[in-house]
Image: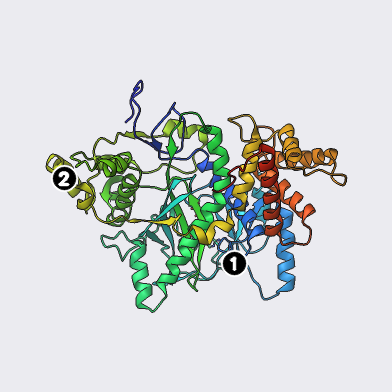
Amino acid sequence: QFPFGRRLPCDIYWHGVSFHDNNIFSGQVNKFPGMMETVRKITLSRAMRTMQDLFPLEYNFYPRSWILPEELSLFVTEVRTMKDSNPSWKPTFIVKPDGGCQGDGIYLIKDPSDTRLTGSIQSRPAVVQEYICKPLLMDKLKFDIRLYVLLKSLEPLEIYIAKDGLSRFCTEPYQEPTLKNLHQVFMHLTNYSLNIHSGNFIHSDSVNTGSKRTFSSILCRLSSRGADVKKLWSDIISLVIKTIIALTPELKVYYQSDIPAGKPGPTCFQILGFDILLMKNLKPMLLEVNANPSMRIEHEQELSPGVFENVPSPVDEEVKVAVIRDTLRLVDPQKKKRKDTHLSFHTYLLIFPTQLQSLHAGNAGMKDKQHKHHSLKLSLKLKFYLKLGSCQSLKQAREASEELPDAPKSPEAALPSLCLKQVFPKYAKQFSYLRLVDRVAALFIHFLGVKGTTKLGPTGFRTFIRNCKLSNSSFSMAAVDILYIDITRRWNSMGIDKESGMCLQAFVEAFFCLAQKKYKSLPLHEQVSSLIEFCECRLAALHGKRLLWGCG
Ligand code: ADP
């Protein structure tokens, strides 16, 4: 626990809920600024929509979504058009309140005219999404997958995926949605927090039975049925990389605002929880990204009415201990030193088992102010090296921690192989062409001018147009101002935040607009990449030297 008044900096700061800058000038923080905001349901859907507009085939792993209330009429007309063109299409939609979690406030509807929808959307912004009606079932039950992803660095982009995850099962046999069963949450929603209240929930000591199992146990069963699990993994890896590519532009804007380049500050890393649903044909679909996945390794058991006890959950322990252990191994600041100097280390980082229990994230839906109060600030000074490697249980972990002084001289050798697999930059070649919005964000950040802001003022926008020589006789500076005002006003009226000016997503919209104007006949992604190249060249010429733009 980082005591108030402590002055000495730490190597690693472990914040409980979100990044908050407590005058941290060095070291590494386990949260990125703005991650909570970036993965909220509405923001994520917007970022995915932008990518779907640019690369529809590559981003077809995210269900078609509309943002309410602002896109209600679009939702109604698009669904009507699709139904008219394909009368056999009998869709179901899932409505999810923005900022909700653990299934809170979620319901299913069959038609956009449903009164539940029209009655509630004015009071609570939400995402309405096409419901995946044909999920893969196991033992007749719907389940989803929670995978842990480490975003180790934003610039350069470094992504790791945990080789094992969790599968969370529904507790009522699945049936395709009908008006009669729409409200049956134990059949349609896989949330642990909901299903735990069902009489059918099975806590299990084994990793391949019960209502929560390891993902590897699912893969084993699929493989024994002859499924191509290698292809499934590669589809999941590609889903994860593409999703992070969709999130990075926004994250970079937050990052430069909280940790401006050139000033002393920490670097960041973050463990994310990816919720994925497998369709019957084994296609993985992204449901959501959790900035603050629960790291609890125990669950509550009701011993007698009203009397609860925390008992270890072997499935959670198996997956989560490895994720935290290996995250710390990867961000270990001593590692490089050790490599460089060939020192033999007798020192160990000790994450006390009790701390591991309390590293569980709180409620992802908590309001921002609450975060700061509820944040558990665990600062782990890396003077010890991690020795939780082969611990199967808390008891063993405790024993291991007591053994530390006599531990072997090469701690890495005593640890199991890493459970986190690097996927980026490893597969960068395959995916870098998707990083267009990153380059638009680099332009945006360049013209922000004042450090510490996330919004572009009218002067910054004009400077962008002038420096990139985008105005001409058919696109006057007056038209530029109108474009700025139109788009900015619309985005700000959506009430996303109160700071005035043009946010990144509004800038991206304006940029796409300019690209369409300039390169009419090309597909959108070629229009956008042509305009990016045009702007980058203009700026490079202006600065008299070749600048390193974009994703590097
Ligand atoms: P929350 O943050 O409240 O858990 P999710 O987006 O994860 O919200 O949705 C809750 C549950 O609803 C998921 O775990 C999944 O079982 C189900 N679900 C969500 N979206 C869909 C969808 N598009 N199709 C089918 N099931 C879905």
The structure residue drawn at horizontal position 38% and vertical position 78%, both measured from the top left corner, is 225
Q: Position of residue 358 (x, y in %)?
A: 32, 40
Marks 2 and 1: in contact by CB < 8 Å?
A: no
Q: Nearer the viewer, residue 331 or 293?
A: 331
Q: Is residue 298 visible?
A: no
Q: Position of residue 388 (x, y in %)?
A: 23, 48
The structure residue drawn at horizontal position 47% and vertical position 46%, both measured from the top left corner, is 291
Residue to which mark 1 is pinned: 179
Identified by mark 2, the residue type is Lys
Q: Position of residue 315 (x, y in %)?
A: 30, 57
Give the residue at the far left of this rendering. Answer: 406
How far separated are the C-alphas under marks 1 and 2? Answer: 64 Å
- Residue 415 horizontal side relative to residue 174, left or right: left
Q: Secondary structure at mark 1?
A: loop
Identified by mark 1, the residue type is Leu
Who comes first in sequence, dot 1 or dot 2?
1
Q: Which label sits on residue 65?
A: none
Q: Quadrant of the N terminus?
A: top left
Give the residue at the far front of this rendering. Answer: 544
Q: Which label sits on residue 409?
A: 2
Q: Is residue 505 visible?
A: yes
